[in-house]
């Protein structure tokens, strides 16, 4: 097996340079095809000598066909290996960058050594220890995936060289030498000289494992998987957002064709009405996502990323980002609440989150600038609510607990996909705040700040013993906003069903939703009820709640307006 020290020394240049020389020799050989055909059938020559000569020529032709296949296999293997090594180099580079940036070291044998962090405040020791344990595991995953990739490359190349040495690339004896083509033999050889692309970790793997796998692939290997295996990539937490988006856009087209064809068949055959309704919802959701991902002129919106796409379960699920999640200095993940659907109100949420990002960037501009990306995440199935339903039924173990687990991995994936972590904020509204709260009980989400608004609570259990300190974010970095007239935020917490009321929770900073004046002297409007927290009010005025959310997202909580 390849060692870490060996992988660090691998250099693709030798193989990449060899491809040119091999190709030149291959082209000279292939140019002989016409001459070989003429030699094999000399006009007017008959008899025993002619037959013996023809047999000899056939052996020569078969040998040259096999030689052409050997050279083409070697050319392909050298090119693929050189390319694949660039992925190994990238995987090594990312792992070493993460290690050195966090006071770790990777030894030549691949061991991860924690050099420790000096001067950790006592109240932060446990959180720091948990984070360092997570980082150590991530680095181990990265080392393991790089070495697995390197070993796979080494094994594949040795297998190709072994076939060439044994003369087993192709068997040319069954070919029609009257119509011989050394180029055709070369094409067959090239197929047999291709390297495999390492399969991904199993479904449900930790985001750090997915990130390590993706980092150790070359750019051309990634493009191949995005085009040919988008299902491996699009919903894999830990893969770069831009690559997930490209894969999911491919999946979107594939699934639209499949759902439409099946829907047409069911309609023709007067099929099951429930299945027809299910497929109609999915086609509608795909059309809605397509609309959100494109500009009015039909071109792809460069400011949007489709980070997840899931048409399984009772209802479609998706995550859409504004901005570049891979490079933004500040990233916020917003989880909406009850009655949220991909084909219904997701577009409004995405637009609202774009507004939050723009407000945050305006604040950052006063301090030298900064980039912001926001993600609207409907990766769980929110409850539905109507006038006859009870507000007490906002959460079930199936939707919020599973949703919280999935959201935790999604957040982890954002950090794992980047060599340097962004300032990451979790935003949760209504039932989405319960999901967000559950996600933040997981260690290592990478979330630096959390804001809940219109919240009935942040835990899925009875009792009033939970505090903001139970959320695994730094102390003092959890915030709650409650607007006047919001029954969900006012009355549901009093039932204690979802833990202590967020507006009375120890360690929770309370921010205003009332009319106010910002630090720059600009007026801010009041938000009222359950659904105005992220709105821009008439006249282009930010609501106080939106302003406060943007201030936290920008990492500038000093600009937020505290609740009175």
Image (cartoon, rainbow, N blue to C red):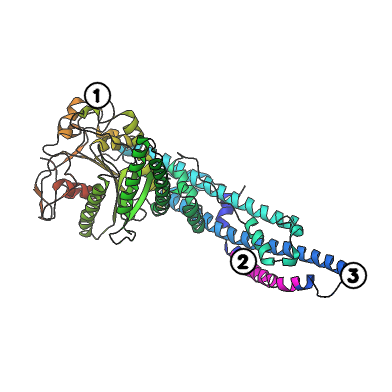
Up-down relation of residue 221 to residue 532 (above or below): below
Residue 30 lies in magenta, yes or no? Answer: yes
Residue that label 3 marks: 49
Residue 456's image quarter? top left
Residue at the image position 29 percent from the left and 33 percent from the top: 470
Looking at the picture, does residue 424 appear above or below residue 432? below
Residue at 44% x, 53% y: name it. Answer: 97
State the image coordinates of residue 62 (x, y, percent, origin top left).
76, 63
Looking at the image, tell me whether mark 3 or mark 1 is earlier in sequence order.
3
Q: Where are the magenta residues, as a range?
A: 16-37
Residue at disc 3, secondary structure: helix
- Residue lying furthest top in this view? 463
Please name which of the two marks, 3 or 1, marks the residue nearer to the observer: 3
Q: Is residue 255 left or right of residue 172?
A: left
Given contact means CB atoms under 8 Å apart, are the residues at marks 3 and 1 in contact? no
Q: Is residue 437 above or below residue 541?
A: above
Dot 2 surroundings within 10 Å: few (below 14), some, or many (20 or more)? Answer: some
Q: Position of residue 292 (x, y in %)?
A: 30, 53
Disc number for residue 329: none
For the question of whether residue 329 can be seen, the reply is no
Secondary structure state at the residue bearing disc 1: loop
Q: Which mark is residue 463?
A: 1
Q: Nearer the viewer, residue 324 or 4?
A: 324
The residue under the point 32% across, 33% down is: 399
Determine which residue is flagged by label 2: 19
Whichever of labels 1 and 2 marks the residue nearer the N terminus, that label is 2
Residue 101 relative to residue 195: left or right: left
> Mark 1 or mark 2, which is nearer to you?
2
């Amino acid at each position: 097996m390849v060692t870490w020290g060996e992988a660090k020394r691998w250099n693709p240049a030798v193989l990449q340079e060899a491809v040119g020389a091999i190709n030149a020799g291959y082209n000279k050989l292939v140019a002989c095809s016409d001459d070989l055909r003429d030699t094999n059938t000399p006009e007017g020559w008959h008899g025993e000598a002619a037959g013996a000569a023809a047999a000899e020529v056939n052996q020569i032709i078969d040998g040259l066909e096999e030689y052409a296949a050997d050279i083409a296999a070697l050319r392909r293997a050298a090119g693929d290996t050189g390319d694949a090594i660039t992925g190994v180099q990238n995987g090594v580079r990312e792992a070493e960058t993460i290690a050195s940036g966090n006071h770790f070291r990777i030894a030549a044998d691949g061991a991860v050594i924690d050099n420790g962090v000096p001067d950790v405040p006592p109240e932060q020791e446990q959180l720091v220890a948990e984070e360092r344990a997570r980082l150590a595991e991530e680095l181990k995953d990265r080392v393991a995936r790089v070495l697995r990739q390197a070993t796979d490359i080494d094994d594949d190349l040795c297998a190709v060289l072994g076939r060439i040495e044994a003369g087993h690339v192709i068997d040319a004896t069954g070919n029609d030498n009257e119509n011989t083509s050394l180029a055709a033999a070369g094409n067959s050889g090239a197929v047999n000289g291709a390297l495999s692309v390492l399969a991904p970790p199993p479904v449900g793997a930790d985001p750090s494992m997915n990130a390590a796998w993706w980092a150790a692939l070359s750019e051309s290997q990634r493009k191949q998987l995005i085009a040919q295996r988008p299902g491996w990539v699009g919903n894999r937490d830990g893969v770069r957002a831009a690559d997930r988006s490209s894969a999911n856009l491919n999946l979107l087209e594939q699934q639209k064709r499949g759902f439409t064809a099946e829907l047409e068949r069911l309609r023709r055959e007067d099929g099951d009405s429930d299945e027809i309704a299910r497929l109609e919802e999915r086609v509608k959701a795909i059309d809605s996502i397509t609309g959100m991902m494109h500009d009015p002129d039909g071109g792809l919106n460069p400011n949007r990323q489709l980070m997840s796409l899931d048409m399984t379960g009772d209802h479609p699920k998706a995550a859409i980002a504004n901005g570049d999640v891979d490079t933004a200095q500040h990233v916020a993940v917003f989880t909406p609440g009850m009655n949220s659907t991909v084909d219904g109100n997701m577009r409004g949420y995405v637009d609202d989150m774009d507004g939050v990002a723009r407000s945050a960037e305006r604040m950052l501009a006063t301090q030298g600038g900064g980039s912001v990306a926001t993600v609207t995440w409907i990766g769980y199935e929110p409850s539905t609510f109507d006038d006859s339903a009870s507000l007490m039924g906002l959460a079930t173990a199936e939707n919020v607990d599973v949703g919280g687990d999935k959201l935790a991995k999604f957040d982890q994936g954002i950090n794992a996909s980047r060599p340097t972590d962004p300032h990451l904020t979790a935003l949760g509204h209504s039932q989405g705040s319960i999901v967000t709260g559950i996600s933040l009980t997981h260690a290592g989400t990478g979330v630096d700040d959390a804001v809940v608004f219109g919240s009935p609570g942040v835990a899925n259990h009875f009792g009033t013993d939970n505090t903001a300190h139970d959320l695994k974010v730094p102390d003092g970095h959890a915030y709650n906003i409650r607007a006047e007239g919001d029954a969900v935020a006012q009355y549901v917490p009093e039932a204690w069903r979802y833990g202590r009321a967020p507006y009375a929770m120890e360690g929770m900073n309370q921010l205003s939703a009332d009319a106010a004046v910002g630090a720059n002297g600009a007026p801010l409007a009041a938000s009222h009820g359950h659904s105005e927290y992220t709105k821009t009010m008439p006249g282009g005025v930010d609501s106080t709640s939106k302003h406060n959310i943007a201030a936290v997202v920008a990492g500038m909580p000093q600009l937020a307006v505290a609740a009175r």
